[in-house]
Image (tube, helix red, strand yellow):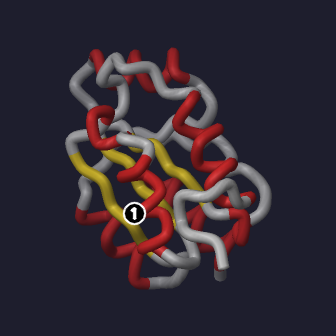
Amino acid sequence: MKTATEKTPDSARLAEDISCLAESGVFSVAVFIWEEPECARTLSSALGIGRFFSEIAYVPPRGDWLQLLSLLKVDVFASGSLERVAAASASGLRSVWISRGLNLGSPLPRVESVRDLLSTLSREIG
């Protein structure tokens, strides 16, 4: 049995995700939506991503995490565009980086607000 820090498809995906992050403080919140949140917690801790974020949440892909995302009061989510997130951050909006386990399939589409984000995620998962 592999440990959480060994190279599994999930750990390789997470390592690839966080290798894209600049240490610029652009993102303020990280949300890991994984089937096994403890696995994501262990992986992210081993990879030292805490320095990138002011808040980190680990949630399963079920309805209860939708409430958690809304409690984070995230104003902007920009998928795949550091420039857009940087612009939002510069204007005082908080931004979120989301890492998804392989169980959820395709990447998130780009959305403009937390309302759009919650709507999109609930459609994909529900």
Task: Please state, as top left, top right, bottom left or bottom right, where the N terminus lies in the image.
Answer: bottom right
Is residue 32 toward the left or the right of residue 95 in the image?
right
In percent of width and height, residue 47 lies at 44, 43
Element type where label 1 sits in the image? helix
Q: Residue furthest front?
A: 1
Q: Which residue lies furthest to the right in this view?
A: 106
In percent of width and height, residue 44 lies at 43, 52
* Looking at the image, residue 43 lies above or below residue 23: below
Total marks drawn? 1
| Closest to the observer, 119 or 57 | 57
| Closest to the observer, 87 or 40 | 40
Task: Please state, as top left, top right, bottom left or bottom right, where the C terminus lies in the image.
Answer: bottom right
What residue is at 27 percent from the left and 34 percent from the top?
A: 51
Identify residue type, mark 1: Arg
Q: In which quarter of the image is residue 4?
A: bottom right
In percent of width and height, residue 96 lies at 40, 43
Mark 1, residues whose alpha carbon is within 10 Å: few (<14), some, or many (≥20)? some
In percent of width and height, residue 41 lies at 39, 63
What residue is at 52 percent from the left and 77 percent from the top?
A: 36
What residue is at 42 percent from the left and 73 percent from the top?
A: 38
Q: In which quarter of the image is residue 122?
A: bottom right
* Looking at the image, residue 35 lies above or below residue 119: below
Q: Name the residue carrying label 1.
A: 41
| Closest to the observer, 69 or 115 | 69
What residue is at 50 percent from the left and 50 percent from the top?
A: 98
Is residue 92 toward the left or the right of residue 26 in the image?
left
